[in-house]
Image (cartoon, grey):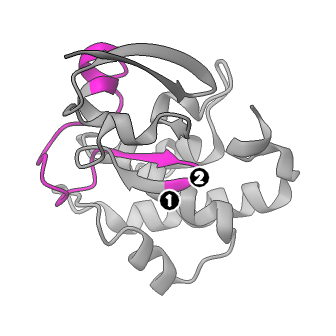
């Protein structure tokens, strides 16, 4: 039996028909066409499907869509403001941290969650924040440099740029 559910994704409300067993990843990609969030392992092992739920990095492949009705969901598509990339997106490009690109949306979402709490993370804090994200190209050093640079930019920006305050 289908049930209409309202999800708030990237500051926009979507009404979707759910059977109840659909993951947030399935709804994002298959129902709404938000394909920036990647489907890889579907088993909470790789982090490619990372999104923010109420500002926290969460794996959408193991999150039931029905369980996040009423929550603020942000995907990689929701970070840019029009044509202006979010600083973490821009620094990943500037530092050559994007290789094949498959892991990058999840890496960026995990990195942003870290930088929203701490714009000057230590190496250990960055490694911990990205512990659940796998890059098969092994581009971690460039990613860490990009995170440091984005932290400098984000630390200098007014707080109005956080997810919760831009809605």
On the rendered structure, is 30 left or right of 160? left
| Residue named by callout 1 | 111
Whether residue 127 is visible, yes or no, is yes
| Frontmost residue, 61 versus 98 | 61
Image mark for residue 55: 2
**Quarter occupied by residue 35:** top left
Q: Quadrant of the N terminus?
A: top left
On the rendered structure, is 141 left or right of 41? right
> Which residue is at a point 30% across and 24% down the rendered structure image?
27
> Which residue is at a point 56% across and 65% down the rendered structure image?
114
Inspect the magenta stretch and tell me whether residue 41 lies in it: yes
Q: Secondary structure at mark 1?
A: helix
| Frontmost residue, 35 versus 87 | 35
Look at the picture and state if 34 lies above or below 114.
above
Residue 10, given in percent of the width and then of the height, sits at 57, 28
| Frontmost residue, 146 versus 32 | 32
């Amino acid at each position: 039996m289908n049930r209409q559910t309202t999800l708030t994704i990237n500051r926009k409300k979507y009404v979707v028909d759910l059977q109840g067993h659909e993951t947030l990843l399935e709804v994002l990609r298959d129902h709404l066409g938000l394909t920036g969030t990647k489907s890889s392992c579907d088993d909470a092992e790789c982090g490619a499907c990372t999104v923010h739920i109420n500002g926290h990095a969460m794996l959408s492949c193991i999150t039931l869509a029905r369980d996040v009705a009423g929550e603020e969901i942000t995907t990689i598509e929701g970070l840019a403001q029009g044509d202006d990339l979010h600083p973490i997106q821009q620094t990943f490009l500037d530092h050559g941290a994007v290789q094949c690109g498959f892991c990058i949306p999840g890496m960026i979402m995990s990195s942003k969650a870290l930088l929203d709490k701490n714009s000057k993370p230590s190496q250990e804090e960055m490694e911990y924040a990205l512990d659940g994200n796998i890059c098969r190209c092994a581009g971690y050093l460039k990613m860490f440099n990009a995170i440091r640079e984005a932290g400098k930019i984000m630390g200098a920006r007014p707080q109005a740029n956080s997810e919760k305050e831009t809605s």
